[in-house]
Amino acid sequence: MKDKIRKISIVVVENDEDEQFFIKQQFEASGLFDIQAMLKNGDDLFEWMEARPGQLPDLILSDLNMPGMNGRQIVREIRLSPVYSKIPVVITSTSTVKQVIDDCVDDGAAAYLVKPETFIDYGAFAAQLYQIAAEKLKL
């Protein structure tokens, strides 16, 4: 008998509406995630979390480069917060520059994933993110 997969509650922080659409569609299709919110930047993220203290996500997926509070700033703020510090933050970006990736991980990101080049690759991206999150959350 196959074990039932536990859905991971996630908040996605992404300013690009097309990316939001692709992520939402493929993450929902995967059956692996329960998307709690799609937000435009870190400022919106912290406002959202402060308004829902009892409904914090299991995981935050954040774009690296956004107007307002960006992904690296989100990671730093999460790590400094006694309330939010246990929430893993995975950074995603189109950048494959090693120094950028290392900087995000050094700041405290749980992982760094390069964004898929095409829409159809978001299914594999969802599976990869779930595997990382399951390890961090000890599922």
Image (tube, grey):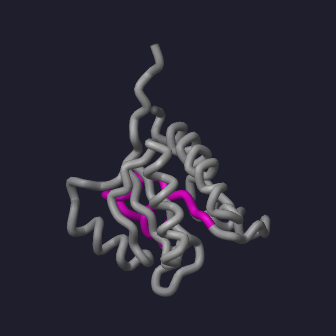
Instruction: Name the residue located 31 percent from the left edge and 58 percent from the top edge.
Output: 83
The image position of residue 39, as x and y in percent, is 39, 72
Instruction: Name the residue located 48 percent from the left edge and 77 percent from the top edge.
Output: 17
83 left or right, relative to 6:
left
Instruction: Name the residue located 35 percent from the left edge and 77 percent from the top edge.
Output: 44
Q: Is residue 88 magenta?
A: yes
Q: Is residue 7 magenta?
A: no
Q: Quadrant of the C terminus?
A: top left
The image position of residue 81, as x and y in percent, is 37, 63
Occupied quadrant, residue 97: bottom right
Image label count:
0
Q: Quadrant of the N terminus?
A: top left
55 left or right, relative to 40:
left
Considering depth in this image, is 138 or 108 the residue closer to the camera?
Answer: 138
The image position of residue 41, as x and y in percent, is 44, 77
Q: Is residue 111 above or below residue 66?
A: above
Residue reaching furthest bottom?
A: 67
Specify start and end residues of the magenta stretch as a single range.
74-92
Considering depth in this image, is 30 or 55 the residue closer to the camera?
Answer: 30
Considering depth in this image, is 6 or 51 the residue closer to the camera?
Answer: 6
Occupied quadrant, residue 114: bottom right
Considering depth in this image, is 33 or 131 the residue closer to the camera?
Answer: 33
The image position of residue 33, as x and y in percent, is 42, 47
Q: Is residue 74 above or below residue 56?
A: below
Instruction: Name the residue located 56 percent from the left edge and 53 percent from the top edge.
Output: 110
